[in-house]
């Protein structure tokens, strides 16, 4: 319940900020985004291509922009200054989901140890809901882009998101000791990799902050519509987003993801 209240509170802050900017007369843009997500977590092996390829999911989102270059109240451009012509403020509500498995040399078919079977049997799921803001920088003139001075407008962005995560975990490993045979029980430590520290599996819901940075480009298809391609890197301030924190020496980073999203942006006239 506390998380729901926190999310609702942040959403109200975002609505209030948009209302404040609206009072200043700045114009607005809305859009939708979707695309594949590569989730980098404690599942699999670091720098392993099969891990990067296998642990992929999907993300979708709604985006809203404050366009400082144009005033909706007078249907005119704002005062000509560098900030207004090169920056936009983006707010976002998004969700991503990724099924997670162990890949790499430790689960190769040639390995028949109990530990390898424990890793092969363990699977999980990252399930995250985001609310956040990013400041986007356009090196080329926003005004010229809106006036069809050029079709492509590259951009860089940086911001922060609040993330509510709800991971899942399961195992198909069957312990060879009949006394401990309890397949699928995530609370039985004998079902998971014996080299991990106790308590390495935790599927309780939680929340954390993250930093978001992206590089992308817009393509003008109509006076009031753009297509967008955006490659995002998002780093969480928690190592429990995927439900696994094995705490070994090789576990050097918190969870993070790369999201390639495609979007459609509409200008509210």
Image (tube, grey):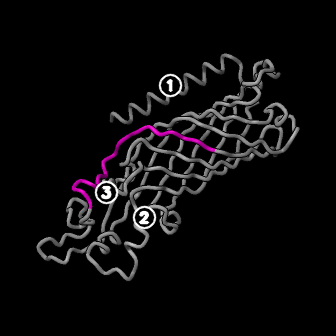
Q: Which circle, 3 or 1, is nearer the viewer?
A: 3
223 is higher (above) or lower (below) than 66: below
Q: Nearer the viewer, residue 82 or 91?
A: 82
Determine contact: label 3, label 2, CB under 8 Å: no
- The residue at 47%/57% (across/down) is 98
Residue 122 location, x and y as percent?
A: 33, 66
How far apart are the two marked residues, 3 and 2, measured between alpha carbons? 12 Å
Determine contact: label 3, label 1, CB under 8 Å: no
Circle 3 crowding by C-alpha within 10 Å: few under 14, some 14–19, many from 20: few
Q: How many marks?
A: 3
Q: Nearer the viewer, residue 137 or 132?
A: 137
Residue 51 location, x and y as percent?
A: 47, 65
Residue 19 location, x and y as percent?
A: 60, 21
How far apart are the two marked residues, 3 and 1, measured between alpha carbons? 39 Å
> In terms of sequence position, does the residue under pointer 1 or pointer 2 come before the other?
1
> In terms of sequence position, does the residue under pointer 3 or pointer 1 come before the other?
1
Q: Which circle, 1 or 2, is nearer the viewer?
A: 2
Question: Residue 31 vs residue 150: left or right?
Answer: left
Residue tagged by mark 2? 45
Dot label at residue 248: 3
Rendering quarter of residue 120: bottom left
Dot label at residue 57: none
Residue 37 location, x and y as percent?
A: 54, 55
Q: Residue furthest left?
A: 179
Q: Nearer the viewer, residue 145 or 92?
A: 145
Query: Which stretch appears magenta?
Result: 196-214
- The residue at 30%/48% (across/down) is 204
Residue tagged by mark 1? 13
Give the structural element (helix, strand or loop) at label 1: helix
Give the structural element (helix, strand or loop) at label 2: loop
- The residue at 50%/37% (across/down) is 161
């Amino acid at each position: 319940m506390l998380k729901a209240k926190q999310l609702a509170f942040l959403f109200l802050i975002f609505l209030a900020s948009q209302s404040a900017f609206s009072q200043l007369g700045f114009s607005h843009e809305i859009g939708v985004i979707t695309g594949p997500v590569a989730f980098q977590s404690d599942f699999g092996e670091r720098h392993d291509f099969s891990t990067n390829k296998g642990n992929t999911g999907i993300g979708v989102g709604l985006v809203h922009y404050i366009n400082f270059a144009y005033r909706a109240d007078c249907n005119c451009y704002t005062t000509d200054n560098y900030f207004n012509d090169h920056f936009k403020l983006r707010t976002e509500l998004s969700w991503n989901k990724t099924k997670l498995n162990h890949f790499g040399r430790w689960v190769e078919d040639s390995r028949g140890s109990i530990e390898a079977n424990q890793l092969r049997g363990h699977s999980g799921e990252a399930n995250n809901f985001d609310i956040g803001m990013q400041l986007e920088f356009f090196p080329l003139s926003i005004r010229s882009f809106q006036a069809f001075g050029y079709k492509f407008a590259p951009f860089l962005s940086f911001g922060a998101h609040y993330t509510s995560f709800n991971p899942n975990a399961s195992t198909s490993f069957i312990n060879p000791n009949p006394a401990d045979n309890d397949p699928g029980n995530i609370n039985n430590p004998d079902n998971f990799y014996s080299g991990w520290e106790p308590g390495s599996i935790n599927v309780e819901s939680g929340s954390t902050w993250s930093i978001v940075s992206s590089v992308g480009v817009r393509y003008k298809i109509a006076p009031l519509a753009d297509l967008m391609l955006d490659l995002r890197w998002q780093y969480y301030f928690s190592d429990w987003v995927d439900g696994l924190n094995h705490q070994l020496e090789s576990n050097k980073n918190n969870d993070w993801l790369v999201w390639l999203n495609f979007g459609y942006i509409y200008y509210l006239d």
